[in-house]
Amino acid sequence: MTDTSRALQDLLDKQEIREVVLRYCRGIDRLDFALVHDCYHPDGIDHHTGFDGNVDEYIAWVQPRLEVLGGTMHHVGNHLVELFGDVAISEAYSTNTHWGHPDRGDFTSGARFVDLMERRQGRWAIAERWAVREWTRSDAGRMTSPEAVGPRGSRDESDVLAHLRSRIANRH
């Protein structure tokens, strides 16, 4: 492989890995647990605050915790990917807002997703994830109502993303 083709393949691999992280965030925020599950290899492991186990156990653990919330929004910032052939280390900084929690109220946390990614059968996915919580801040009393009428997010098929995806899919 030439230096140019190696550099191009590295860029493609890094983009695919970044998209795994972004799909995970979309899945969590939209309560699309099939999408979250697809971000992991079948034997993938997850380490979260209050949880350690395989991907199936993680979904079973996180789903009821998210469904009681009014919503979540995960923002990915700095994201560095280090490639080692078919293995990579992905470190993505994130700021995660949670609202409508029946016990804790509204809160925001800063975290890093430190992932061991592996390419298996041509597909990059999480082999092991550490969701490293760096800080948590209470947002109690800080959330306000929207300032005007307009699109609002939902975590079901009525969300604008679901409508748009359906509209595009029906064209093809």
Image (spheres, rainbow, N blue to C red):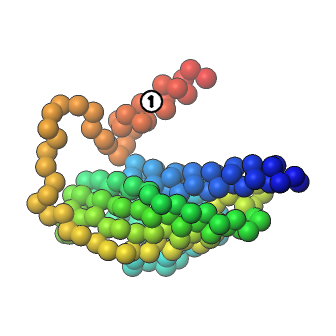
Residue farthest toward the left in the current orientation of the protein: 141
Closest to the observer, 117 or 29: 117
Quadrant in which the N terminus is drawn: bottom right
Q: Which residue is mark 1?
A: 164
Q: How many marks?
A: 1
In this view, 159 is above or below 129: above
Q: Nearer the viewer, residue 113 or 66?
A: 113
Vertically, is 55 above or below 69? below
The answer to which quarter of the image holds residue 10 is bottom right
| Amino acid at dot 1 | Leu
Looking at the rendered image, the quarter that the C terminus falls into is top right
Residue depicted at x 14% and y 64%: 140
Asked if residue 10 lies left or right of residue 133, the reply is right
- Residue occupying the point 44% across, 75% down: 132
| Rendering coords of residue 31 (x, y %) | 41, 52
Q: Of all residues shown, which one is farthest toward the front? A: 3
Residue at figure coordinates x 27%, y 33% from the top left: 151
Residue 73 drawn at (x, y percent): 34, 54
Q: In the image, is 149 to the left or to the right of 31? A: left
